[in-house]
Image: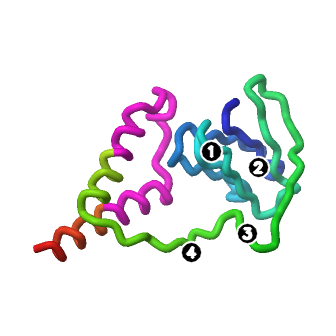
Amino acid sequence: MKNRAKCKLCESIIESFHQTDYVTCKCGEISVDGGEHHYRCAAKNWDNFLRVDDEDNIIIPTIKEKDDVKLLDIEAKEVPKLGYEELLKMLEDMIKTIEEMPPEAMLTSVNQYDLMSLMMIVVSIFKAEKSSN
């Protein structure tokens, strides 16, 4: 099953194609992430979130929230301290993932979360290299 959703507010249908593909609707109300590997999703208001199956049928999801879990909290994430080789491997894995994307995914624009992830890895590689010298 594809990782797709529809926003009730702007009526955008969005789809995440790969593990690091974070996609938000036009109005910013809902998002999906993780491609077909991890069906992560988020919404400002879950009443505006609908799933879309492979045959374009609309599915009204049952939302279960836990008090101690935030579904999307980018600010709270901490970047682990990794060595130069581990960081370089992460960057190579990102390149491999992008190379394996379907052609239609290659034509989508890069979002700010993708760009930020890339920049964080590159900066970490430079810092790791500098500290090893």
- The label nearer to you, 1 versus 4, is 1
Q: CA distance from mark 2 to mark 1?
A: 24 Å
Tag 1's secondary structure?
A: loop
Tag 2's secondary structure?
A: loop
- The label nearer to you, 2 versus 1, is 1
Seen at 18% across and 76% down, the residue is 131
Name the residue type under label 2.
Cys
Sequence-wise, the earlier of marks 3 and 2 is: 2
In the figure, 14 relative to 119: above or below? above
Alpha-carbon neighbours of circle 3 within 10 Å: few (<14), some, or many (≥20)? few
Reply yes or no: does residue 118 show up in magenta. Answer: yes
Sequence-wise, the earlier of marks 2 and 4 is: 2
Instruction: Give the percent coordinates (x, y) of residue 104.
Output: 51, 29
- Nearer the observer, 56 or 68: 68
The reply to whether callout 2 and callout 4 are in contact (CB within 8 Å) is: no
Q: Circle 2 sits on which residue?
A: 10
Magenta-drawn segment: 93-121
Sequence-wise, the earlier of marks 1 and 4 is: 1
Residue lying farthest to the top in this orientation: 55
Quadrant in which the N terminus is drawn: top right
Tag 4's secondary structure?
A: helix
Q: Circle 3 sits on which residue?
A: 69
Image mark for residue 75: 4
- The label nearer to you, 3 versus 2, is 3
Quadrant in which the C terminus is drawn: bottom left
Q: CA distance from mark 2 to mark 4?
A: 26 Å
Instruction: Give the percent coordinates (x, y) of residue 92.
Output: 30, 46
Q: CA distance from mark 4 to mark 3?
A: 14 Å
> What kind of secondary structure does the magenta stretch mostly adopt?
helix
- The label nearer to you, 2 versus 4, is 4
Alpha-carbon neighbours of circle 4 within 10 Å: few (<14), some, or many (≥20)? few
Q: Circle 1 sits on which residue?
A: 38
